[in-house]
Image (cartoon, rainbow, N blue to C red):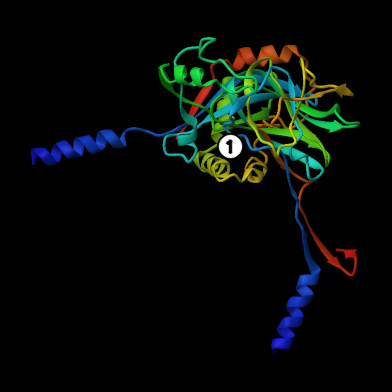
Amino acid sequence: MKRLFLILIIFLCFSMVVNATTIKFNPTGTHIKDGLLKIRLDFYPDVNSKTYIEQYIDVFARELTEKEKEVDKEGNFTAKALALQKLVPTVKQLNPFLCLFIVVDPNITKAQLLTYIQNNYGKAVITELDTAIKDGIKTALPTILKNKVSITSQAIATKETDIEKVNASLLGFEVEVK
Amino acid sequence: MKKILLTVLFILAIFQMVVLATAIDIGSAAINGDTTSILATLVSRDNTANETGVITSVEIWAETNLANCEVATFDEGDASILTTRDNESIGAVTADSKQTFVVSLNIVAGDMIGIYFSSGSMDMTGDAGAVGTYYLAGDQIPCTGADFSLYGPAPMKRLSLYGTGATPAATTTNIFMGVNF
């Protein structure tokens, strides 16, 4: 009986591990195109998604030294450099599987962005995006994202200072979609 | 009975003519290549655009993290003389896996795809069958009539930069005897 109870507890603990896609605001991608202010959202795959294995990668734990990144005249790493690289410690890193841009008003707040994501990027949509990218059906992306890449419904004339303004306002924004 | 059904089917087929958008692709597959790029504006000569329309996604495989990255479509006038058709700033690009960006870049059949970043390096693949990559020092996005050089030495290099898109929106048109309904 005790053993059964223990198994049940372990099962419950495992089932409490929630898998979620994380969407993060990336200030490096904020730009103006055709008079519209666009912000960049990076989608990080959840552990059960199709793209997770491709994006959960090993990276060097430190910058490579000049000797470790020595290349030949064709630009390839030399045999010596490759041998040295094998000795450099690595760490795991999760990269985004998709980076997309949405048109926003310069006065957008974190609360408005959160509501927008909750209304437009549910689990089903993210699964569709994940599948389209994994299966190489990039032409499906515009269909999936139709009416989902603009918070504002009209063109807004913007100026360079709006980039700083929106970056300051949304800095650190991230949300988990379960 | 069969004849009537066939006739009905035939008439329906004539009336319902679906005009689908054609897929566009440009550049070479974003793969983990065997060589690394220099710091310059790089333009892929391989697989020029097959149609006119809009590039909606760009895939990049970077060797090391890229900063202040811009992607662009280029028109080649005279040989190696390039002019930017459209461009978009995408920001930082993480290295060591294929990164997909949803963009909107106008493109005309025959155009090339290119990239600029202020630091980092792109993956490239040496291939004797490749058409190669153009380069020009500095940020050439946008540019008008800039004189690029062919990236060397041999073998030619494929840039791990790939774009996909489509011709203008798909339409469903009912056509009969040349008349739209």
Rendering coords of residue B177 (x, y %) = 89, 70
Residue A10 in the image: above or below residue B65: below
Residue B94 in the image: above or below residue A138: above
Rendering coords of residue B123 (x, y %) = 62, 27
Which residue was labeled with disc 1? A120
Rendering coords of residue B56 (x, y %) = 70, 38
Question: Residue at (69%, 87%) from the top-left corner?
Answer: B2
Residue B104 appears in view: yes
Front-most of residues A129 and B84: B84
Residue A65 in the image: above or below residue B103: above
Chain assignment, label 1: A
Query: What's the amino acid at mark 1?
Result: Asn
Quadrant of the drawing holding the C terminus of chain B: bottom right
In the image, is B171 to the left or to the right of B39? right
In the picture, residue A2 is in which quadrant? top left
Question: Residue at (85%, 32%) from the top-left corner?
Answer: B75
Front-most of residues A124 and B80: B80
Rendering coords of residue A81 (x, y %) = 50, 17
